[in-house]
Image: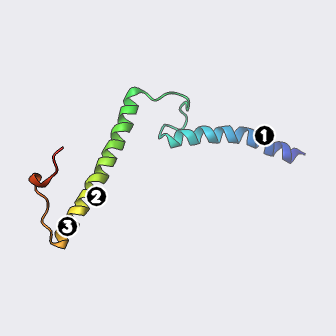
């Protein structure tokens, strides 16, 4: 009986504590900060800019790979006059 009480007490304390710490880890916040606090405007801007930089880097990498592939196949790269007008 004593062992069951210990397990139940451990679950009652461990689950909320684990959720709290896990939520803060997932949001890249300090572990003991308030998980319900809304992010400040500056933090939101930083997160958005980080995502934008990451996406633009991926796009540049893909375009560079496509350009290398064209050069390897012997095709000349497109000039600005060949681009379709919008």
Question: Badge 3, how many Cα within 10 Å: few under 14, some, many 20+?
Answer: some
Determine which quarter of the picture holds residue 63: bottom left
- Residue reaching furthest right? 1
In which quadrant will I find the N terminus?
top right
* Side of 47 relative to 13 (left or right): left
Instruction: Report which residue position mark 1 lands on.
Output: 9
Q: Earlier in the sequence, mark 2 or mark 3?
A: 2
Instruction: Report which residue position mark 2 lands on.
Output: 62
In which quadrant will I find the C terminus?
top left
Determine which quarter of the picture holds residue 21: top right
Give the residue at x 74% y 43%: 11
Distance of label 2 from label 3 (alpha carbons) = 12 Å
Q: Secondary structure at mark 1?
A: helix
* Side of 80 relative to 39 (left or right): left
Give the residue at x 33% y 48%: 55
Give the residue at x 63% y 42%: 18
Q: Earlier in the sequence, mark 1 or mark 3?
A: 1
Question: Badge 1, how many Cα within 10 Å: few under 14, some, many 20+?
Answer: few
Distance of label 1 from label 3 (alpha carbons) = 65 Å
Q: Is residue 1 above or below residue 75?
A: above
Q: Nearer the viewer, mark 2 or mark 3?
A: 3
Residues at marks 2 and 1 touching, judged by CB atoms closer than 8 Å: no
Q: Secondary structure at mark 3?
A: helix
Distance of label 2 from label 1 (alpha carbons) = 53 Å
């Amino acid at each position: 009986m004593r062992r069951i009480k210990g397990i139940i007490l451990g679950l009652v304390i461990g689950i909320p504590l684990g959720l709290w710490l896990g939520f803060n880890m997932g949001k890249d916040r300090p572990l003991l900060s308030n998980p319900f606090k809304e992010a400040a405007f500056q933090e939101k801007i930083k997160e958005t800019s980080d995502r934008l930089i990451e996406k633009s880097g991926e796009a540049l990498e893909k375009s560079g790979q496509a350009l290398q592939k064209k050069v390897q196949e012997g095709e000349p790269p497109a000039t600005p006059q060949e681009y379709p007008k919008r």
